[in-house]
Image: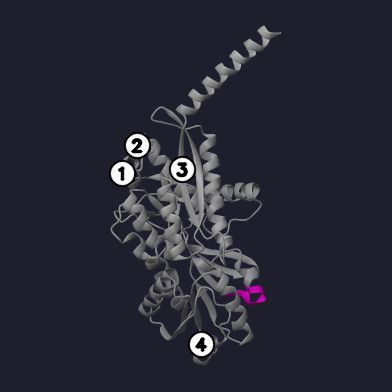
Amino acid sequence: MNWKLTRLAAVAAALSITGAASAQQQEVVRIGHVAPLSGAIAHLGKDNENGARLAIEDLNARNLKINGRSVRFELMAEDDAADPKQGTAAAQKLVDAKVNGVVGHLNSGTSIPAAKIYFDAGIPQISPSSTNPRFTRQGFNTTFRVVADDVHLGGTLGRYAVTTLKGQSIAIIDDRTAYGMGVADEFEKGAKAAGGKVVGREFTTDKSTDFMAILTSVKAKNPDVVFFGGMDAVAGPMLRQMKSLGINAKFVGGDGICSSELPKLAGDAIGDSQVYCAKAGGVEGEQIAAMKAFNERFKKRFNADVQIYAPYVYDALMVMADSMVRANSTRPSVYLPELAKSSYKGVTGTIAFDNKGDIRNGALTLFTYRGPARQELGIVR
């Protein structure tokens, strides 16, 4: 009996040593992800985070080896509540944890100040959804994005509002955030260049719920189009209040309002072909099937539809991992040059960056809503 126990103990010890050696050979690669997981647009933040989780799961299923060692990817998810102060705190937390890279933040207002923190630490940052031009114009070689910026998005919407929607008189409202102001500024430039007249510009905040005063002012100007620079959580109640005041103008917004949640937030004020928006990104040709397959896998895994940017988060994380494989290193300073010269075919298309870190040949997708259904109008590059 004692001999058997001794032998079992020896076997257990041997297995323990083997397991420890195996664990030593495996490298943990930590990827930070930051988005608002609390507050009015938490549904968009969770959508982004789930895109990152799906990428992590897929990478680990591949059993990748980098520099001869097995690697296991881990996600460090942080909540910035779409608040710049909380965003920089989250960025510093990830730097202190020595993450290998960061995918995020969702909002321009948090991505822009966080970029300096990542740059100082030498950690690559890829935003899947920040569109303010300033994000990649701060001179940081660690900063990238996988969607088109507001110059393209806002300007295209401005021209569309005038040439296609026939909006000759246009009112503009923005929420005073880096994103909302940025996209509204570019929309105004595009609309004026196309011959439209801006009859008024109003301001709110990203936390407001009562817009009756500014909408009363807008109604007095009788615009053909109302443009809103902000997010769906504000756009929904704004649409309801526009309807109650009898404002029948077309409602146009950027990617912040272009979610599957907007019809729920706006109710019957969404109308048919009354609301138009553009999403920074879009697929065509053979990529349509890849995006459809991704959406189906996402729905099966999380029991939720893609809101807006989950596929772009997925691709951002994948292109980062691909750069590590090509560099044969997970060290940020080593794989960063490979990331800068990426040409990666992802779910959302081919990802390649220009010298500022912006996506090359970025697409926009135009949408309208017919009741609760968001319908694609076309791709613009």
**Compared to 346, does 80 lie above or below?**
below
Q: Residues within 10 Å of mark 4 (few under 14, many from 20)?
A: many
Which residue does the image show at 56% across and 65% down from the upper left?
Answer: 41
Query: Which residue is farthest bottom?
Result: 220
User: In terms of secondary structure, where does tag 4 sit?
Assistant: helix
Which residue does the image show at 63% across and 71% down from the upper left?
Answer: 265
**Labels 2 and 1 touching (C-beta < 8 A):** yes
Q: CA distance from mark 1 to mark 4?
A: 50 Å
Q: Which mark is residue 337?
A: 1
Which residue does the image show at 29% across and 54% down from the upper left?
Answer: 355
Residues rendered magenta in the picture: 266-274
Q: Position of residue 23 (x, y in %)?
A: 50, 28
First in sequence: mark 1 vs mark 4 = 4
Q: Dot 4 corresponds to which residue? A: 218
First in sequence: mark 3 vs mark 1 = 3
User: In terms of secondary structure, where does tag 1 sit?
Assistant: helix
Q: Dot 2 corresponds to which residue? A: 327
Q: Quadrant of the N terminus?
A: top right
